[in-house]
Image (cartoon, helix red, strand yellow):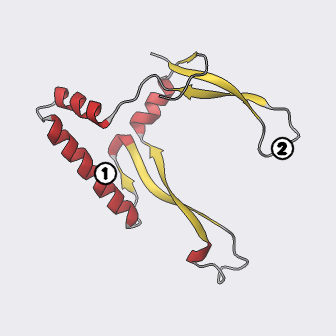
Amino acid sequence: MAINYSVSQRANPKDSMAEPKWYANAQAKNRLTMDALCRLVEKATTLSSGEVRAVLTDAISFITEALEAGDTVEFGDLGSFGIALSSTGATTEEDFDASYIKKARVTFFPGRAFQQMCKRLQYEKVSVRPHV
């Protein structure tokens, strides 16, 4: 199975005088919802869909709590989650305080399973279409 992609022309944000170039955009074929994921796991295990949903919901809650506490969350071969910060710069280290921090975001670092999957991907060009 191949990953669908389309191409779009974009300017270089670092060089407004450069000629725009064409870049790939992944085109999702479908969306795997939480309900559908729970049903898939239900079919592959002895757990009910409700039990799977409860475990996944609790996992999300525990991951969120750990990230809020400043921890990195390692999730096996899936990968790890952490917090990254964006801030403005201070003239000196002593001047810097939390007011310089403008935004936090969750980062994801893929584990072995995702890294191996990415190496196996094949691609197929398609027309531009709305995201699923």
Judged from this view, the residue extending furthest toward the right is 17
- Position in image of residue 98 (x %, y %): 56, 76
Q: Classify residue 38 by image quadrant.
A: top left
Report the disc number at residue 15. Answer: 2
Dot 1, crowdedness within 10 Å: few (<14), some or many (≥20)?
Answer: few
Residue lying at 29% horizontally and 55% vertically, measured from the top left: 61
Disc 1, SS:
helix
| Left or right, residue 80 beside residue 49 | right
The residue lying toward the viewer, choosing from 74 and 125, is 125
Residue at the disc numbered 1: 60
Q: In this image, 78 relative to 45: left or right?
A: right
The structure residue drawn at horizontal position 41% and vertical position 38%, both measured from the top left corner, is: 112
Residue 80 place in picture, x, y as percent: 41, 49
Q: In front: 14, or 120?
A: 14
When the figure is inspected, residue 52 is found, relative to residue 71, above or below; the finding is: above
Q: Which mark is residue 20?
A: none
Q: Amino acid at mark 1?
A: Ile
Against 27, residue 63 (above or below) is: below
Q: Residues within 10 Å of mark 2 (few under 14, many from 20)?
A: few
